[in-house]
Amino acid sequence: MSTPIIKVDAISKSFGAFKVLDGLSMQVMPREKLALIGPSGSGKTTILRILMTLERIDGGHIQIEGEQLYHMERNGQLLPADERHLARMRQKIGMVFQLFNLFPHKSVIDNVTLAPMLTKGTPRAAAEKRAMELLDMVGMADKAKAMPAQLSGGQKQRVAIARALALQPKIMLFDEVTSALDPELVEEVLNVLWRLCAETDMTMLLVTHEMGFAHDFADRVLFFDRGRIVEEGKPDEIFRHPKQERTQGFLKKIIAAGHRV
Amino acid sequence: MTQWSGYFGLIVQGAIVTIELTLMGSVLALIMAFLAGLGRLSRLFLLRALATAYIEFFRGTSIFVQLFFAYFVLPLIGLELTPLQAGVLALGLNVGAYAAEVVRGAVQSIGREQHEACIALNLGRWQGLRHVILPQAFLVMLPTFGNNAIELLKATSVVSLISLADLTFQAQVVRAQTGNTMVPFATILVIYFILALLISWGVRSLERRMARGLDGVRV
């Protein structure tokens, strides 16, 4: 049994009086593909944002590759992480957002090369060569010089994926990456995810409402509700034979809304 | 006719002083705007406090008094300024205080998702500001900066009160020497207006150039 790449231990997080995560624990193994599903407000997006250090936790611990994410060990004591520690930990993690969050004032290729050049000191030529390879992989090489405003939603999202990959993270977080897309554009983004799955050994965490995709893609599915993981298991177990009432209720609603499982 | 052409030379000299003042004052205002505007967004309390104090003080006191202070009071504590230096200092600091709020507002108008993309790409705070936030925010600032520059141009006329020979000063000279009020003041009215038009036009074309390919960012 190898060691988990992500270890979340009893974390809690509140926004004001609303408890989003309530003593949540989970483990993710290297190369695992995880789908996080559940009703909105259940905390599944929050856990991704916490892993990307976009939100701070109120309590608990997170380890990435055995190292504390939000704490630093000094003389045997755990202290809150400083910006330098966070920056070092962030190198292991990349994230793709629901609304792409491309830099609108930069061309497609500049979006991809910016972070490697600034954070790793990669020379421009090398960064551009690598960016073209990544853009080629997501099928966007011919749009390298385009501005984001000229692209469709699906194209923007594929560029955003290439941009996150350019930093070579070991863990990729996908936060409802197809939710903002027109239905006919969803496929092209999901195809890129399939390719990543086949061609890289990244650990991937996927918050999604695409139940069919989650079923086919994930090694393990976590069902979130009210800040806790209510049920987890292989896709077939969760989607075909859910044990918990809340999971059954959620899936029934999803199917009634016309989603394929 | 010959009489007027001589006086016209004075007006041209005055216009040159006014343009000089406007340019130098704008440069100082721009520097102060970014220093104080970003200072207000700093995490450090001291920087925020300094920036706020500067902005509130210079917005809250009259440009006349600031100018007189720079020219007549600073020498009393050993800081002798030429009229031009005093004028640039007062104008730059005054307009810079207004423009600082423009910088702050524009930076804050850039959506949270851009900041989050910076964090997810592990850019440092300054790197994100420099390469992602400010280039987009600058486009938001530009139209208001144009207004500020025009305000500054118009405010330059106060320097005539410390005997700097700008447009307004020269108009008064011409009026005193010719006894004609209409011609000199009508002339400088038109010149101020043309200068303001030039600023508007310059800012607008800069805006157009920078906004190329950027639909969706423009506010």
Image: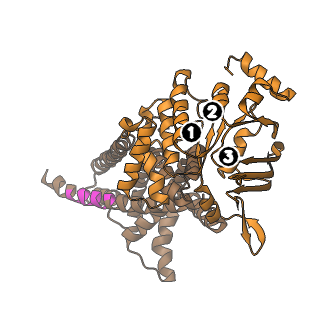
Chain colours: A orange, B brown
Along the line of sight, the residue nearer the viewer: A26 or B18: A26
- Marks 3, 1 in one chain: yes
Q: Amino acid at mark 3?
A: Arg
Q: Residues within 10 Å of mark 2 (few under 14, many from 20)?
A: some
- Marks 1, 2 in one chain: yes
In the rendering, at what x and y percent does residue B117 appear? 56, 47
What secondary structure is the stretch in magenta mostly built from?
A: helix
* As drawn, A26 above or below B163: above
In the rendering, at what x and y percent does residue B92 appear? 45, 62
Segment colored magenta: B9-19
Q: Mark 1 or 2 closer to N-term? A: 1
The residue marked by circle 1 belongs to what chain?
A: A
Along the line of sight, the residue nearer the viewer: B204 or A153: A153
Identify the residue under disc 3: A49
SS of the residue under disc 3? helix
Q: Nearer the viewer, mark 3 or mark 1?
A: 1
Do labels 1 and 2 touch, CB within 8 Å? yes
Identify the residue under disc 1: A197
* As drawn, B3 above or below A140: below
Q: Is residue B94 visible?
A: no
Identify the residue under disc 2: A217
Q: Magenta segment: does it hold B13?
A: yes
In the rendering, at what x and y percent does residue A44 appear? 73, 39
